[in-house]
Image: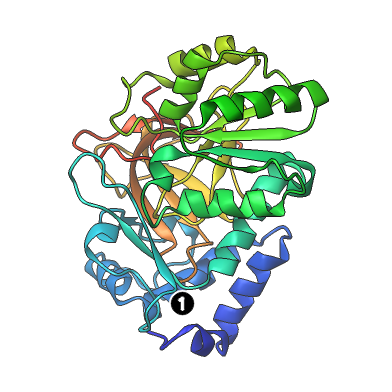
Amino acid sequence: MFTNVQEAENSSAYRHIKETLLEGKKLEWDELALSLFELQYFHNPIYKDWCDHLNKNPQKVNALSEIPFLPIDFFKSQKLSIFQSKPQTYFQSSGTGGYGSSKHAAYDLDFYDELCQQAFEAEYGALEDFCVFALLPAYLEREGSSLVRMADRFIARTKDSDSGFFLNDLDRLKQLLAQKQKDKKPTLLLGVSFALWDLAEKFPQDLSNIIIMETGGMKGRRKELIRGELHQIFKEAFKVESIHSEYGMTELFSQAYSQGNGIFKASRTMQVFARELEDPFSPARNGKSGGLNIIDLANLNSCAFIETQDLGRVHENGTFEVLGRFDRAEVRGCNLMLA
């Protein structure tokens, strides 16, 4: 393990990966991912033990398909880090469902903030042109939410003084949304699903000029619906053609976005793969349902190779769908509804 971030940055391999990610340019994906695999194999002892258990090491791994994926539940019981020192903070899941909370050590919040901004702007344009409303009551009521951190960055980068978080003041939010709709101001309404549902029931209105983006998660507040049904409720209430979605979780520092129909495009630092349901070590073919494995290069300081508990399909062009979760898998704040 490295002692701290400063020691790691004296390593040419670590420095190259970090600087390349921050440049915001197209990545030489295979080369970068294999370099990160080698780095984390030698500096993350938990991941190294897992790889050794599977008889995998940098000498035997020469392609992305050969990299071992670490089961996501390790984030509940282990400190996954390449550093010995304490992190700046921990991002923590809500633990909804009684299966325990995941903790993700964050050593460089500026790095996280920058990559979140890059991911959003690659899909939607400069944040400074937007007004951003964050309707995230369940997340604001606890500490350690990576989603709140991301939304805070977005709000800070806008030049609109109306941008901000909303806890329970739906009346004020309704008024601001109406004004932005009238002004045709580029506006993002980022909300947890149950809160958007509350808004749709209490204040249906024409928001056809506004991007409505759900982050998933009923968190026990409302009845779970399949995504299509929930999006239809939102579309009818807000007079919009499509509902956007954000796919993210405590264990990932990257995000994916859907501009409608539940088809997600991963950010430049993220690739998604499907594995066979009956054999987690075998890849599923494109278009076939399976468990989702994710390489997240933004997880530079922890573990970039994650076997999630999400079910989905990966398409030939790299886009993907999330279809639900494995039986007995935890129902967490950022998971998307069954589709």
Give the residue furthest to the top.
236
What color scheme is it? rainbow
Looking at the rendered image, the quarter that the C terminus falls into is top left
Q: Amino acid at mark 1?
A: Leu
5 left or right of 15 in image = left
- The answer to which image quadrant residue 218 occupies is top left
Residue at coordinates 36% horizontally, 25% vertically from top-left?
Answer: 338
Residue 214 in the image, given as x and y percentages of width and height? 51, 31
Dot 1 surroundings within 10 Å: few (below 14), some, or many (20 or more)? many
- The answer to which image quadrant residue 174 occupies is top right
Would residue 268 be visible to someone looking at this image?
A: no
**Kind of element beneath mark 1:** helix
256 left or right of 225 in image = right
| Depicted 130 relative to depicted 250: above or below | above
Q: Which of 27/333 is in front?
A: 333
Residue 247 in the image, given as x and y percentages of width and height? 49, 40
Residue 270 in the image, given as x and y percentages of width and height? 54, 52
Residue beneath disc 1:
39
Residue at coordinates 40% horizontally, 48% vertically from top-left?
Answer: 293
